[in-house]
Amino acid sequence: MLTRIRLFPLAILSLSALTSIGPLHADANELLVSEPPYQTREDILYREGDDLTEYMQERCRLDVYYPADVKQFSTVVWFHGGGLKGGNRSVPKGLENKGIAVVAVNYRLHPKVQSPAYIEDAAAAVAWTFKNIEKYGGSSERIFVSGHSAGGYLTSMIGLDKSWLAAHDIDADKIAGLIPYSGHTITHFTVRAERGIDGNQPIIDDMAPLFHLRNDAPPLLLITGDRELEMLGRYEENAYMWRMMQVVKHPDTTLYELDG
């Protein structure tokens, strides 16, 4: 489905996204009015091993924001934007107090690291969530992955290219749904710059979500801003992703364009 819609609050749109591509703990109407008590566990190191660098120990951390008295809740793993060069983890305001958990993730950034370090970190954070969310009361069968801009790019990469999660013995198809907001579907401009490629020169290689099209991928909800206001080409590349997912006969890809 390809849809152009008026601007919605993030909470409404996100809940619509979740209910359209997978089960929530309760129906959307209940979630919009329910405010269960919440707890937050902060600054959890999600990468393991004796070879972690000081920078990995600094950046590879996440916060778990979850409803304390709810069981089998859904979880959104959220990756911040910032061009793979900046940004910090936070829980989107629109996802607060909605009966779902949010795992807000930091990852390493350019120029201290280069590709594929960002994707490796994102996969490690999602794997951590699969292995640990039940300790907080959540369901490992209701884990969604989302993020804005660079975070949307990471969302699509780890959901479509199964190799990143396979390195952690996790099947990417267990993700309940992918919800990238304004994410690159071509190779990210920072990754291109690392290779000396001009930012205005689009490429599609193994560092592009479009390279990894498959009809058995998790449900995919692509969300962009108005094509006249969005970053250059961002709507068009997401529209192309939507079209090509139809070509490979993926059964559940939707594109929302926010109007205005």
Image: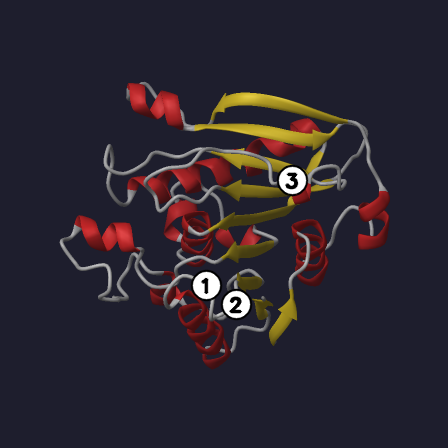
Marks 2,3: beta carbons within 8 A: no
Residue 112 x/y as whole percent:
24, 32
Viewer-side residue, 244 vs 129? 244
Q: Nearer the viewer, mark 2 or mark 3?
A: 2
Identify the residue under disc 3: 93
Figure disc tally: 3
Residue that appears at 66% across and 58% down:
17
- Of the 4 image quadrants, the one containing the C terminus is bottom right
Q: Is residue 245 above or below residue 164?
A: below
Q: Tell me the kind of residue under disc 1.
A: Glu
Q: Tag 1: Cα neighbours inside 10 Å, few (<14), some, or many (≥20)?
A: some
Three-letter code for the amino acid on which mark 3 is drawn: Lys
Q: Is residue 122 above or below residue 255?
A: above
Q: At x 36% / y 44%, what residue is drawn?
A: 119
For residue 69, which quarter of the picture?
Answer: top right
* Left or right: where 30 falls relative to 227: right
| Residue wearing tag 1 | 230
Q: Position of residue 134 (x, y in %)?
A: 66, 32
Q: Is residue 239 visible?
A: yes
Neighbor class of circle 3 (other Cα within 10 Å; few <14, some 14-19, many 20+) is few
Q: CA distance from mark 2 to mark 3?
A: 21 Å
Labels 2 & 1 near each other (Cβ < 8 A) = yes
What is the C-alpha distance between the residues marked 2 and 1? Answer: 6 Å
Going from N to C along the chain, the mark reached first, 2 or 3, is 3
CA–CA distance between discs 3 and 1? 21 Å
Q: Secondary structure at mark 2?
A: loop
- Mark 2 surroundings: few (<14), some (14-19) or many (≥20) residues within 10 A: some
Q: Position of residue 141 (x, y in %)?
A: 65, 47
Q: Residue at x 64, y 62 (%)?
A: 7
Q: Amino acid at mark 2?
A: Asp
Residue holding disc 2: 226
Q: Nearer the viewer, residue 167 or 55?
A: 55
